[in-house]
Image (spheres, coloured by chain):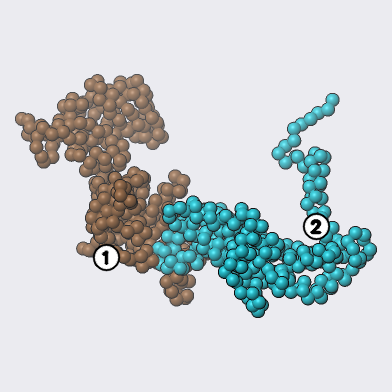
């Protein structure tokens, strides 16, 4: 006779088909990325057959001036647009949280609208906008990245707003009053009490903004010119000729940068959270 | 301790929110220097709003707040010589205990050498020596409250405001903290103004109590005065338990007196005022005596049936009904283990001293 005891809440991992489906999911998610990374070391012009290990394409990617330039452009845009998004996004979040005014719900919706608008529409709109106002082209670096940076700010600051706004909901406003009561000015209260509370939100929002900007293709494609190529746009143009291991190498570098930045942010967030656990 | 000029003068202060809500309605109060003063009332009576006007978080719609001889109109909270302990304690979660207590000194530019010494003193005052490096999430609720206290006291304010400071603590800790607050106030000599809805808290701690209701101050008195001579039905009913009867002022052969028909015409001396009017007559349940047999010494005694008997350990609360149908509640002290406990349905004799009756005009 076969005895069947129902699995406990943590026992589901024991059944074979559950493990199998988990494995399939991971393969589905990570096999393409693993292949990409693996073939960046492939000693072959083409990406199909494994012909031995080499660092050659990393050297080639590093020596490729236009690729390097695109990479620096991307990092510059990501850093600047993240900084601006953090300030704008945090200000919008505090504004929506602190004040009551007519049509506040509408304002809240409007601020977060760029999150749901299709990127292609944003791209076309940006292209039309910069053409219409006659945004100057041919400026020296890094001013020539202005249009792309503005476009990136416009789609990434709502993410900062949403994350910081969510964080502010749990803020105990008596803390602000306590600071004022103890002699702090409005500015000191903001700096010493509200800002530290917002920090995890700012960190998460900043991380979102940075990665969104770094790998954005659609909107960037519409706002970049011949002298302002970003990394994703450059990769796209390289792939149009052939998928060489050089592209794999450059993409692997991007993945590693993203992972490192994310890990740092998560670690920082973990550290601040430890200090505030259990206190409203 | 006390001087002629009160440390806080509240002069016909009102606070309206919007057009319809009157939170505080023409309140006049004078709080003396060094006093432990309590604002007592049910929730929504305006006591917290009044306290927040003292701290500067609310601006009076009318009237004046004078603290230490200075009109507080237009003075923001950070420029007032008062400090507050918040209901949620509002300890800064991202700062250590030391930094929390030091914060008020740092932002006002106190020299660093002085800060260290004063913080250490303040932590010692609330019995948190050695807790400086801890973070708030490593503290219990009671300890966080001590941090909030130290943080306010380190500023050496003229007045310390406490907004329901004990409401979040459990019963045992609350009692200990009551004693602790009284000890602290004695030690520092600062005027304490505490807001509470708990009458036990107010009675046991405060030198004087203002009872508030509907935005108005109903009575300002010492705890004993408030308990033994309440000025109105509201105060009588709000503070402790109370038997309330209807009485009439009567001019008779024995002079002017108040007659309570529900208690077989029991009479007590009448206050000033015209005859024939209706007044309230109040009697504390613990001043009602209950016995098995008719007491010989009592002029007035009623036979009554025990309707309910609620045993509370140290005392038993009895609800009785007299032959005339009047309901009387009595509190009996369980002074001896040998004593028999009254139980429902039993016939007993009820008596009291007519000097314990309190005549209430309103």
- Say which residue label 2 marks: A33
Query: B264 and B24: which one is in front?
Result: B24
Does residue B96 lie above or below B163 as drawn?
Answer: below
User: Alpha-carbon neighbours of circle 1 within 10 Å: few (<14), some, or many (≥20)?
Assistant: few
Residue B337, by quadrant, is top left
Q: Mark 2 lies on which chain?
A: A
Question: At 57% across and 55% down in the image, what residue appears?
Answer: A113
User: Alpha-carbon neighbours of circle 2 within 10 Å: few (<14), some, or many (≥20)?
Assistant: some
Query: A168 and B177: which one is in front?
Result: A168
Question: At 43% across and 74% down in the image, what residue appears?
Answer: B110
Q: Which chain carries label 1?
A: B
Q: Which residue lies furthest to the bottom in this view?
A: A140
Question: At 81% across and 46% down in the image, what residue appears?
Answer: A24
Q: Is residue A50 left or right of residue B280?
A: right
Q: Which residue lies furthest to the left in this view?
A: B253
Residue B187 visible, this orientation? no
Query: A266 and B190: which one is in front?
Result: A266
Supply the letter of whichever chain is cyan: A
Residue A133 on image: x %, y %: 57, 69
Can you tell which mark lies on residue A58? none
In the rendering, what colour is chain B? Answer: brown
Residue B242, by quadrant, is top left
Question: Looking at the rendering, in which quadrant would you find the N terminus of chain A?
Answer: top right
Query: A172 and B355: which one is in front?
Result: A172
Residue B21 visible, this orientation? yes
Question: At 78% across and 47% down in the image, what residue appears?
Answer: A25
Q: Are marks 2 and 1 on the same chain?
A: no
Q: Is residue A146 left or right of residue B39?
A: right
- Gap between marks 2 and 1, in whole Å? 71 Å
- SS for dot 2: helix
- Say which residue label 1 marks: B71
């Amino acid at each position: 006779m076969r005895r069947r005891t129902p699995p406990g809440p943590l026992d589901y991992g024991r059944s074979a088909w559950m493990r199998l489906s988990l494995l399939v999911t991971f393969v589905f998610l990570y096999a393409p990325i693993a292949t990409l990374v693996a073939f960046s070391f492939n000693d072959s012009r083409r990406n199909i057959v494994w012909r031995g290990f080499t660092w050659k394409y990393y050297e080639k990617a590093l020596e490729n001036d236009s690729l390097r330039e695109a990479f620096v452009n991307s990092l510059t845009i990501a850093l600047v647009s993240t900084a601006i998004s953090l300030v704008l996004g945090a200000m919008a979040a505090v504004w929506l949280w602190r004040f009551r005014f007519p049509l506040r719900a509408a304002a809240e919706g409007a601020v977060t609208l760029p999150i749901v608008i299709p990127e292609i529409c944003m791209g076309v709109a940006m292209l039309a906008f910069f053409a219409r106002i006659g945004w100057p082209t041919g400026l020296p670096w890094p001013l020539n990245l202005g249009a792309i940076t503005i476009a990136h700010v416009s789609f990434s600051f709502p993410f900062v707003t949403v994350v910081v706004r969510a964080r502010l909901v749990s803020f105990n406003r008596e803390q602000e009053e306590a600071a004022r009561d103890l002699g702090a000015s409005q500015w000191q209260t903001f700096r010493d009490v509200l800002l530290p509370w917002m920090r995890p939100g700012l960190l998460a929002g900043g991380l979102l903004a940075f990665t969104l900007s770094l790998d954005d293709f659609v909107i960037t494609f519409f706002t970049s010119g011949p002298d302002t190529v970003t990394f994703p746009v450059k990769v796209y143009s390289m792939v149009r000729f052939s998928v060489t291991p050089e592209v794999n190498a450059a993409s692997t570098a991007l993945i590693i940068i993203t992972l490192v930045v994310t890990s740092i942010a998560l670690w920082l967030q973990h550290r601040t959270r430890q200090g505030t656990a259990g206190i409203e | 301790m006390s001087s002629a000029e009160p440390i806080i003068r509240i002069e016909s202060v009102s606070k309206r929110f919007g057009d319809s809500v009157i939170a505080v309605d023409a309140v006049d109060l004078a709080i003396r220097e060094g006093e432990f003063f309590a604002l007592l009332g049910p929730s929504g009576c305006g006591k917290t709003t009044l306290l927040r006007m003292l701290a500067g978080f609310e601006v009076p719609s009318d009237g004046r707040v004078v603290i230490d001889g200075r009109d507080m109109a237009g003075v923001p909270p950070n420029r007032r010589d008062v400090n507050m302990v918040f209901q949620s304690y509002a300890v800064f979660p991202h700062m250590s205990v030391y930094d929390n207590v030091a914060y008020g000194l740092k932002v006002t530019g106190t020299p660093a050498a002085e800060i260290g010494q004063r913080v250490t003193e303040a932590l010692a005052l609330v019995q948190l020596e050695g807790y400086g490096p801890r973070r708030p999430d490593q503290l219990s609720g009671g300890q966080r409250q001590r941090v909030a206290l130290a943080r306010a006291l380190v500023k050496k304010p003229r007045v310390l405001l406490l907004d329901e400071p004990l409401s979040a603590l459990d019963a045992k800790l609350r009692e200990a903290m009551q004693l602790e607050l009284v000890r602290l106030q004695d030690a520092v000599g600062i005027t304490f103004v505490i807001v509470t809805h708990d009458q036990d808290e107010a009675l046991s701690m405060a030198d004087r109590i203002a009872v508030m209701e509907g935005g108005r101050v109903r009575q300002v008195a010492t705890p004993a005065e408030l308990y033994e001579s309440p000025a109105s039905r509201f105060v009588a009913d709000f503070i402790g338990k109370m038997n309330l009867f209807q009485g009439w002022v009567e001019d008779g052969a024995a002079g002017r007196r108040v007659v309570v028909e529900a208690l077989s015409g029991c009479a007590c001396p009448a206050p000033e005022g015209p005859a024939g009017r209706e007044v309230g007559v109040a009697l504390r349940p613990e001043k009602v005596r209950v016995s098995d047999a008719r007491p010989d010494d009592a002029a007035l005694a009623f036979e009554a049936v025990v309707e309910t008997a609620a045993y509370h350990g140290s005392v038993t609360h009895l609800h009785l009904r007299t032959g005339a149908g009047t309901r009387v509640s009595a509190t009996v002290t369980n002074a001896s283990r040998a004593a028999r406990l009254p139980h429902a349905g039993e016939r007993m004799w009820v008596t009291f001293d007519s000097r314990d009756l309190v005549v209430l005009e309103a």
